[in-house]
Amino acid sequence: MTSNRPDPATLTVWILIVGTGLATLARALSIPFLAIHLAADLGLDAVTIGVVVGAGPVFGMAAGPLGGGLSDRMGRRPVLAGALAVSALAFLGLQFAGDAWAYLVLNLLVHGAASVIEPVSRSAMSDCLAPERRLKAFSRRYVAINLGYAVGPLLAASAGLAGAPLFAAAAVAYGLFALAVAATPMPAGHADRVGADRGGADGSPTLRRCIAVASSDRRLLCFVVGTTLTLAVHGQMSVTLSQYLAANFEDGVGLLAILLTANAVTVLSMQGLATRVISRIGPMRALVIGCVGLLAGEVGFAAAGDVVALVIAMIVFTLGEVLLIPSEFMLVDEIAPPPLRGTYFGAQGLSSVGNFLGPWLGGIALVHAGGVAMFLTMGLLAVLGAAVFAYGRGLPPGRAAGVPADALPPRGPDGAAGSRLGMPSPLGAMVVRLHSAA
């Protein structure tokens, strides 16, 4: 008699998918509104808020490359459960914090743990599934994440910020996920372990290795800088946007929730179309169009006087975003030598410093020059990012960190590096997008 019960590996994957969606919802109903909470309850200025909120992703940049390697040595379950427990405690602390320093430290813990959770949970799913089953599982996970981002802000707005235990609710969600992971069996090994000579002692790309590789390949260095500039525009845009809305519109919190939901829904509905467009016109042109979309969206925010105009601006902005992010993935893939492909993508993770630059520069512009100047500054960063990418793509390939010349990607008739993978899979695009949202 055949049992209809799922096998343990499938059950583990579903726990990770559902838990990730729950954790994303918890973040979406709390973290995007942290800036408003700091301004309304602590009376902090926009520059200080930008530092407190933006410092978290910078800390995550250092913590992220270590997560995968640590899980290879200790196993997925203890590292993932531990990071989830740290997140739960940090969110609980945010509920009761009383000064800027406490919020800064706790926000660092939230983002540092998130940077560990993301690669370890993906690795655990890969360990559980055969290669042909992974894409569908990661696609479901991507849907769960975007649903969380779509529903979370609306729940937060309907609950209201005054007296609402949003951070405590997030702590409960992460705590439940941690308990589920701790009780779930996971494979001990890494299915696709990389050789130790390609990264750290255990094969994971270390921060020092990422910096060394980025410094030795000028094309990669340009792509990291370009991604940093564009990430400064879209990675933490809710921080500065929330402050602008709170100061210039009667129901800033409600408007922010509507705009964040419009962003998530547009990403969900347009991701397939964006992939087809990139396939037709190529990643460099798609990236330029995406940056123009970001610029147009920022100009729309600056000119908008009502909710309809704001939603239209957000849709335009998001259309640029869904073209930009997978194109960045493809361009890095084109130049990555096979022996160092993982290290190249690890080096691209250094661009998460853009999550700090955006709130910081936007806060300075908002305080000293106003909202219009802030939006135009962000639009200019998008244009500069496209220019840096275009310059980097025109550079000749060179030896990267001792890689033999015959291991470098071939160049096409136009002089650009040829792609080995062709179109990015939804998983590849997801990896880059989720790393910028953290």
Image (tube, helix red, strand yellow):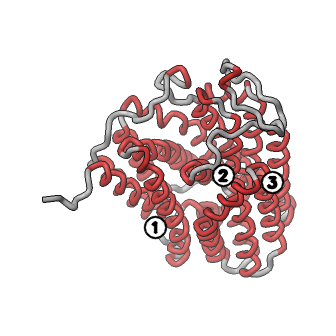
Q: Residue at x 46, y 46 (%)?
A: 122
> Of residues 215 and 252, which is closer to you in this image?
215
Q: Is residue 50 above or below residue 409?
A: below
Q: Which circle's residue, 1 or 2, is located before the other in the chain? A: 1
Task: Please name the residue that numbered disc 1 is placed on.
Answer: 165
- Quote the CA–CA distance across marks 1 and 3: 42 Å
Q: Quadrant of the N terminus?
A: bottom left
Q: Identify the amino acid type marked 2.
A: Pro
Task: Please name the residue that numbered disc 3 is placed on.
Answer: 288
Q: Which circle's residue, 1 or 3, is located before the other in the chain? A: 1
Residue 37, can we see it?
Answer: no
Q: Residue at x 44, y 34 (%)?
A: 192
Label 1: which secondary element: loop
How many neighbours does mark 1 have within 10 angstroms: few (below 14), some (14-19), or many (20 or more)? some
Q: Identify the amino acid type marked 1.
A: Pro
- Quote the CA–CA distance across marks 1 and 2: 36 Å
Q: Residue at x 43, y 54 (%)?
A: 137
